[in-house]
Image: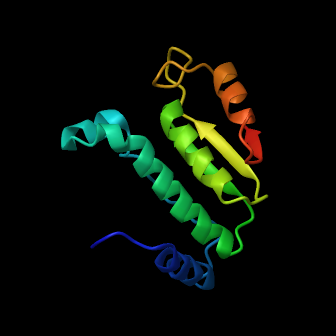
Amino acid sequence: CGKPTSDQLLREHRALIEAGTDAISTITFGALPRVLAEYRLADLASEINYAAARMESEALVRGGVDILHVEHCMDMENLRAAMAAISSLGISTPVMISADIELMGTMLDGTTSADRVRDTSASPATCRQH
């Protein structure tokens, strides 16, 4: 099926909006280093997440999105990649972040909530921590 372009995503998003949707979600759930290692792509995890977040964010912003939601972050590598991609767009669209917290009280990579807030608060993207 090939790699989608931001124009293709924009067309798809407009079609969803015209059909009456209120929210659009894109997922890169499988783009974690330990998942990509199975395909010998673990070292490309940041690059893959950055490209996916940038393309999706660009299409959404061009389509008139009100807020970007970086959701279900399981580790800081993916979260940093998403925030860097959004920041690279030079937009003022608010960004909301949600992270998966394990039973031990940290993200899967051991990052605490305090560290996550500190790390992402330095991003030029407008962050709202939840």
Q: Which residue is drawn at 50% across and 50% down?
A: 50
Left-right relation of 57 to 9: right
Residue that sits furthest to the left in the current view: 39
Q: Could you say where residue 67 lies in the image, as x and y percent from the top left?
A: 72, 59
Q: How many marks?
A: 0
Q: Could you say where residue 72 lies in the image, as x and y percent from the top left?
A: 53, 41
Please determine whether, in this image, residue 80 is positioned above or below residue 20: above
The C terminus - image quarter:
top right
Q: Which residue is drawn at 76% across and 54% down?
A: 94
Residue that sits furthest to the top in the current view: 104
Q: Which residue is at the front of the view, 127 or 91?
A: 91
Left-right relation of 127 to 40: right
Q: Which residue is at the front of the view, 123 or 12?
A: 123
Q: Could you say where residue 86 lies in the image, as x and y percent from the top left?
A: 63, 53
Residue 3 occupies quadrant? bottom left
Q: Which residue is drawn at 71% across and 73% down?
A: 64
Please determine whether, in this image, residue 107 is positioned above or below residue 122: above
Q: Could you say where residue 38 lies in the image, as x and y percent from the top left?
A: 20, 39
Q: Which residue is drawn at 46% across and 25% down?
A: 108
Q: Which residue is at the front of the view, 94 or 106?
A: 94
Please determine whether, in this image, residue 100 is positioned above or below residue 1: above
Left-right relation of 89 to 79: right
Please determine whether, in this image, residue 74 is positioned above or below residue 55: above
Residue 21 occupies quadrant? bottom right
Q: Which residue is at the front of the view, 50 or 66?
A: 50
